[in-house]
Amino acid sequence: MRLSCVLLATGAAWSKRNLLRERRRRHAAGVRRIVMTRLWKKAFAVMAIGGALVVPALVSAKEPIPPAKQAYLRYCSACHGESGKGDGVVSHLMNPRPADLTQLAKKNNGEFPFMRVIRIIDGRETLRAHGDPDMPVWGEIFAAEVPGAMNKEARIRGKVLLITEYLASIQQK
């Protein structure tokens, strides 16, 4: 139903100027939603490509990559960068910028916030009232990767723990 019809049906006395202002506001909100959706699609595409290109390139080295770093590179490096400083290949497209993950302990009085990081990465417990989340809800994404598995929750927690352990290992003092 058109906006003007809704306003007239509700009995609101709106001027043309107010009507146009409301249309522009709704249009801007829709454009933001479309841009963020496209941004996440680009980020996931880069992660898929980046994960396919970065990890095999590093695997060809003499030393095997630890599983925790492999998980981080696959799921997080497109936004947060290989070093975790928030300088990933899509970070310049994001607003707000991805966090510098090497400073988490420093910002928490020298102690790595292990449980908080687990909850943030998983993202399924966080209440999101409006708009797009700052980062993907990885718990749901990991759940979609293993459909129908009996130990689905254990696999999700395992991936989240691997990433969290890697983040704890790259903290700057």
Image: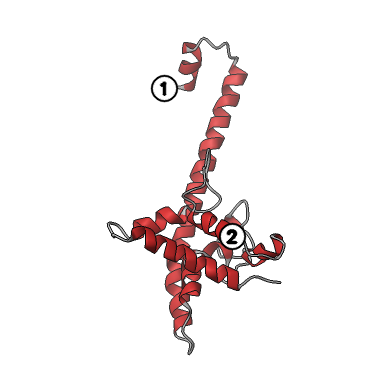
Specify the color scheme.
secondary structure
User: Where's residue 122, x and y in %?
Assistant: 48, 56
Mark earlier in primary sequence (2, 1):
1
Q: Is residue 166 above or below residue 10?
A: below
x, y percentage for residue 167?
A: 57, 68
Instruction: Identify which amino acid the numbered label 2 is placed on.
Output: Ser
Whether residue 139 sits left or right of residue 100 in the image: it is: left
Q: Amino acid at mark 1?
A: Met
Which residue: 46% across, 68% down? Answer: 74
Give the SS element for disc 2. helix
- The x, y position of residue 81, in whole percent, is 57, 67
Secondary structure state at the residue bearing disc 1:
loop
Counting from the top left corner in percent of width and height, residue 164 is at: 53, 65
- Can you tell which quarter of the image residue 142 is in? bottom left
- Mark on residue 91? 2
118 above or below 126?
A: below
User: Which residue is rendered at x = 57% and y = 30% of the image?
Assistant: 24
Along the line of sight, which residue is nearer the eye, 59 or 120? 120
Please tell me the numbered disc located at residue 1: 1
